[in-house]
């Protein structure tokens, strides 16, 4: 069973999504916080801009000599900065209204880490938030509140090894972004200490970031370099299914951060399969996978049956064994989900 958010809250969330997408599209020089300073070099004066964005650390950029053209650039920045600050204030107000209206809010510490990753450019470069924090964000996207309380300190980000969309040469330094938070993030060695790390963890706390990527056929399982993120990711089978149709969604806490999450229908089917594939020792996680999938499917069957049909159609192009696993997983759904079982089974090819 899920609980519907008030219509007013859903409208506010839609407005927040539009504002964040517009702000992201207009991202430029004025989006950087910082200030200008003038330095004398030889007999001339030069202007510099210093920024201290949390995810990037303090950096200084040369703007140009003290000329009319350079001063015009500075004036343009200040006008743009004022507009950006005004937009940010409006977003903060919307977030306050959403919290009062019953929207699902992400834990402050988790939101801080996700915001740092976003500021560094992880989601602009194809990163997709998966796992429980994606499930939390989907509640607002679908206009519901999940029936169970959700608490996890694991932040899972999936990313393809190569960014296929041509957007110019861009990079996001994940280790540096996490280090700049001053929370004590350290690379977490894997089972084989000779291989590069794919996880970062705060010493003495459960707070952790895992980087994941699709596993190529006949791959040995060793970490795969994601050069544009200056990090490596752990390859997992079937992750590519989640990466094919991501959806931009705000993470709401004291403010808001725009991230990518998987298409909810694909996320639900993926959860069913993963839940069946977990070892016996991970029964608790398997039960959580099933519960999350059941709740999403319940909403989709009422509001967005077409999304579920498209997700199943895409599943039909996947390996036969995944469809067989999905069929077995459907039998574990509660009796109240009989309609969903029949709808998915009817579309699945054998």
Image (cartoon, rainbow, N blue to C red):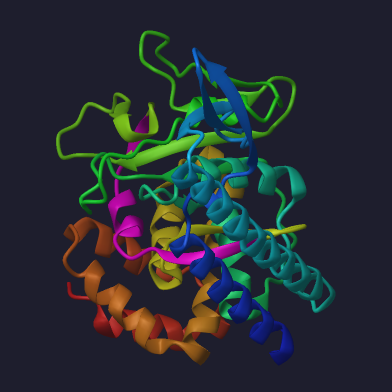
Left or right: where 69 falls relative to 79: left
Residue appearing at x 44%, y 83% in the figure: 340
Location of the N terminus (image quadrant): bottom right
Residue sticking out furthest to the front: 43
**82 or 209, which lies in front?**
82
Q: In this view, does 13 lie above or below 339?
A: above
Whether residue 257 appears in this view of the structure is no
Report if residue 227 lies within the magenta region: no
Q: Where is residue 300 in the image (x, y as percent from the top left)?
A: 48, 83
Left or right: where 342 falls relative to 83: left
Q: Where is residue 55 in the image (x, y as percent from the top left)?
A: 58, 35
Location of the C terminus (image quadrant): bottom left
- Quadrant of residue 319 in the image? bottom left
Left or right: where 179 falls relative to 226: right
**285 or 29, which lies in front?**
29
Residue appearing at x 51%, y 51% in the figure: 72
Q: Where is residue 138 in the image (x, y as percent from the top left)?
A: 56, 68
Left or right: where 241 falls relative to 290: left
Residue appearing at x 48%, y 52% in the figure: 130
Residue appearing at x 55%, y 35% in the figure: 209
Q: Is residue 338 above or below residue 236?
A: below
Q: In this view, does 54 lie above or below 241?
A: above
- Quadrant of residue 206 in the image? top right
Q: Give the range drawn in magenta.
A: 232-251
Report if residue 248 lies within the magenta region: yes
Residue sticking out furthest to the top: 194
């Amino acid at each position: 069973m899920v609980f519907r958010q008030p219509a007013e809250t859903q409208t506010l969330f839609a407005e927040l999504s539009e504002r964040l997408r517009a702000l992201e599209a207009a991202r430029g020089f004025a989006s950087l916080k910082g200030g200008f300073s003038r330095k004398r070099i030889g007999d001339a004066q030069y202007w510099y801009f210093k920024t201290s964005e949390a995810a990037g650390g303090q950096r200084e950029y040369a703007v140009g000599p003290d000329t009319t053209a350079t001063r015009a650039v500075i004036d343009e920045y200040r006008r743009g900065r004022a507009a950006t600050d005004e937009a940010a204030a409006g977003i903060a107000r919307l977030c306050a209204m959403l919290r009062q209206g019953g929207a699902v809010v992400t834990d402050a510490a988790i939101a801080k880490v996700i915001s740092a990753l976003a500021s560094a450019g992880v989601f602009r470069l194809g990163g997709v938030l998966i796992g429980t924090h994606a499930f939390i964000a989907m509640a607002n996207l679908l206009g519901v509140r999940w029936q169970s309380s959700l608490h996890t300190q694991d932040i899972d980000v999936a990313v393809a090894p190569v960014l296929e969309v041509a957007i110019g040469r861009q990079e996001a330094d994940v280790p540096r972004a996490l280090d700049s938070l001053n929370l004590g993030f350290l690379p977490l060695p894997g089972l084989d200490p000779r291989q590069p790390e794919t996880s970062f963890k705060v010493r003495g706390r459960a707070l952790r970031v895992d980087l994941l990527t699709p596993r190529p056929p006949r791959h040995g399982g060793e970490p795969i370099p994601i050069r544009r993120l200056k990090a490596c990711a752990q390859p997992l089978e079937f992750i590519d299914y989640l990466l094919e149709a991501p959806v931009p969604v705000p993470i709401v806490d004291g403010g808001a951060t725009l991230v990518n999450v998987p298409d909810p229908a694909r996320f639900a089917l993926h959860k069913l399969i993963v839940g069946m594939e977990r070892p016996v020792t991970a029964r608790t996680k398997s039960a959580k996978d099933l519960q999350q999938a059941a709740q999403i499917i319940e909403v989709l069957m009422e509001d967005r049956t077409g999304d579920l049909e498209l997700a199943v159609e895409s599943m039909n192009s996947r390996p036969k064994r995944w469809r067989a696993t999905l069929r077995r997983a459907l039998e574990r759904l509660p009796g109240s989900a009989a309609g969903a079982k029949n709808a998915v089974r009817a579309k699945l090819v054998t």
